[in-house]
Image (cartoon, coloured by chain):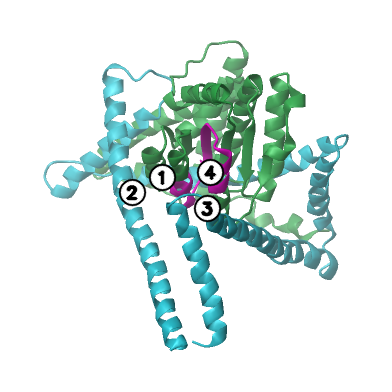
């Protein structure tokens, strides 16, 4: 018998029971809101300025007859930002297919190439134009961070895309790419949850999705019940976090620390 | 510095300068350096993946340790290759689903633990006006609260809620400004390191030639 079946002592870590309870409650919220969305209840999501700019940028690329560049960050598929980026890529591909504009997707991580191909292909199929999908436009460059940045910069300079979309997990290469894109005059919309890179996108891009806006983007663009349900559940979770913050601060002020320590993970 | 070092450091200096020519405009030197670094790194990473991934995580457990259940990830990996066939490419979706699902399953509790619970616990601070730290704690709690309202998507940013969201985005921008300055300083030190490298190389080159 394989040895991994006998690791009975580590099936459950009671030090992290708070994580389990909160995650369980969150999943119940998600399922409830997905059910609401599927039942046809209208779930309001406020306007996100950066996302409205995507369609505007695609329209501009169509008028100029130039391609659109989509960069999905430099992390693998086990990073939630890359997952969110792939969902946005599917929506962008659908939009692009409708306008018949070339979509260039240079990829840094080998495994992401297969997912990106699938997302783009699905987008073209949803738009009813599967024949317009060109697999050569989803390209693997290299996994080395700065070599990838150099390659993307080359594409920006030579293919002169009308719009650059940068959604995903970025590190030190963010400014190198955003600054080059700015110099070519492309409309740039970026989004990341890596807070150290956000300042660079804020200064060099026309619109920036900050932190969770990246995750909200997929729900906002697709209006799919599953994604909308998750977004609504995360809003409810945020509301509870805000209340917990105030309650915890007040209790700390009066010397009661049990509430705060419950949230602490050993 | 011997002849060998002069040649190889010369190549490094040449490639460094070739990349910097990008500051002027796209040109053959930059193109050459760019294609070289992309090509070399792609090949290098293929070898790294083979020796750091394929060999220790599949060949060794399967062939040397006899752990036959490692066939499962091997089959999932092979299934990805069905993408080369139009007819069978749907099979690769099972591997994708497994990888994305397991990745999200591992990441979600970690995100919750590190980016929500730890931050929340650390932000629950005693407040008051009797000491300076307690006053700054009020600022921290207001900043966190208002930033959270900015990321609330179920309500329009209007009225008092909008004002709170505006304070939230200002708080974020103050943080971004500090982060920008800090990182620019880091980048300047990288530039300084490259300039020092080229200066030292030129010194050595002139000494060698004379």
Regarding residue A59, the answer to whether it shows in the image is: yes
Label 2, label 1: how many angstroms apart (C-alpha)?
10 Å
Q: Closer to the observer: label 2 or label 1?
A: 2
The colour one sees for chain A in the rendered image is green
- Judged from this view, the residue extending furthest toward the left is B130
Residue that badge 4 annotates: A157
Label 3, label 1: how many angstroms apart (C-alpha)?
34 Å
Q: Secondary structure at mark 1?
A: loop
Residue that badge 3 annotates: B27
Q: Have a look at marks 3 and 4 and say if they share a chain.
A: no
Which lettered chain is shown in cyan?
B
For residue A46, above or below residue A93: above
Residue that badge 2 annotates: B180
Q: Closer to the observer: label 2 or label 4?
A: 4
Chain assignment, label 3: B
Instruction: Using the image as rendered, state which of residue A109 and residue A233 is in the foreground.
Output: A109
Residue that badge 1 annotates: A195
Callout 2–callout 3 Cβ contact below 8 Å: no
The magenta stretch is A153-177
Going from N to C along the chain, the mark reached first, 2 or 3, is 3
Q: Secondary structure at mark 2?
A: helix
């Amino acid at each position: 018998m394989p040895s991994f079946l006998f690791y009975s002592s580590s099936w459950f870590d009671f030090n992290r029971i708070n994580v389990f309870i909160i995650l369980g409650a969150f999943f119940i919220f998600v399922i409830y809101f997905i059910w609401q969305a599927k039942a046809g209840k209208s779930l309001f999501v406020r306007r996100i300025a950066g996302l409205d700019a995507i369609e505007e940028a695609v329209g501009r690329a169509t008028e100029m007859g130039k391609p659109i560049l989509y960069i999905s960050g430099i992390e693998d598929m086990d990073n939630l930002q890359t997952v969110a980026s792939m969902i946005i890529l599917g929506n962008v591909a659908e939009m692009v297919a409708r306008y018949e504009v070339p979509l260039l997707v240079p990829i840094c991580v080998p495994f992401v190439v297969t997912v990106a191909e699938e997302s783009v292909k699905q987008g073209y199929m949803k738009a009813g134009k599967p024949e317009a999908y060109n697999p050569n436009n989803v390209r693997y460059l290299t996994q080395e961070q700065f070599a990838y940045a150099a390659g993307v910069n080359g594409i920006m300079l030579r293919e002169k895309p009308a719009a650059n979309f940068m959604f995903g997990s970025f590190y030190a290469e963010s400014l190198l790419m955003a600054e080059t894109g700015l110099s070519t005059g492309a409309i740039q919309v970026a989004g990341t949850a890596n807070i150290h890179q956000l300042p660079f996108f804020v200064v060099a891009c026309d619109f920036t999705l900050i932190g969770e806006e990246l995750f909200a983007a997929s729900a906002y663009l697709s209006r799919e019940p599953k994604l909308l349900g998750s977004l609504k559940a995360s809003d409810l979770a945020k509301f509870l976090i805000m209340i917990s913050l105030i309650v915890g601060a007040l209790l700390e002020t009066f010397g009661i620390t049990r509430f705060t320590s419950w949230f602490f993970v050993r | 510095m011997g002849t060998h070092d002069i040649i190889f450091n010369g190549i490094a200096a040449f490639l460094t300068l070739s990349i910097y020519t990008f500051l002027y405009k796209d040109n053959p030197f930059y193109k050459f350096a760019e294609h070289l670094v992309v090509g070399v790194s792609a090949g290098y990473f293929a070898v790294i993946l083979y020796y750091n991934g394929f060999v220790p995580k599949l060949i060794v457990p399967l062939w040397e340790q006899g752990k036959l259940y490692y066939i499962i990830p091997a089959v999932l990996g092979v299934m990805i290759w069905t993408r080369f066939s139009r007819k069978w490419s749907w099979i690769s979706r099972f591997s994708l689903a497994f990888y994305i699902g397991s990745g999200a399953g591992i990441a979600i509790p970690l995100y919750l633990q590190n980016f929500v619970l730890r931050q929340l616990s650390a932000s629950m601070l005693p407040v008051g006006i009797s000491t300076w730290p307690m006053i700054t704690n009020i600022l921290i709690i207001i900043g966190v609260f208002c930033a959270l309202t900015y990321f609330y998507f179920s309500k329009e940013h209007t009225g008092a809620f909008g004002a709170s969201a505006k304070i939230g985005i200002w708080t974020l921008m103050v943080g971004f400004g500090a982060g920008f300055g800090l990182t620019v300083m880091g980048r300047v030190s990288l530039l300084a390191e490259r300039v020092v490298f080229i200066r030292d190389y030129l010194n050595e080159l002139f000494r060698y030639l004379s």
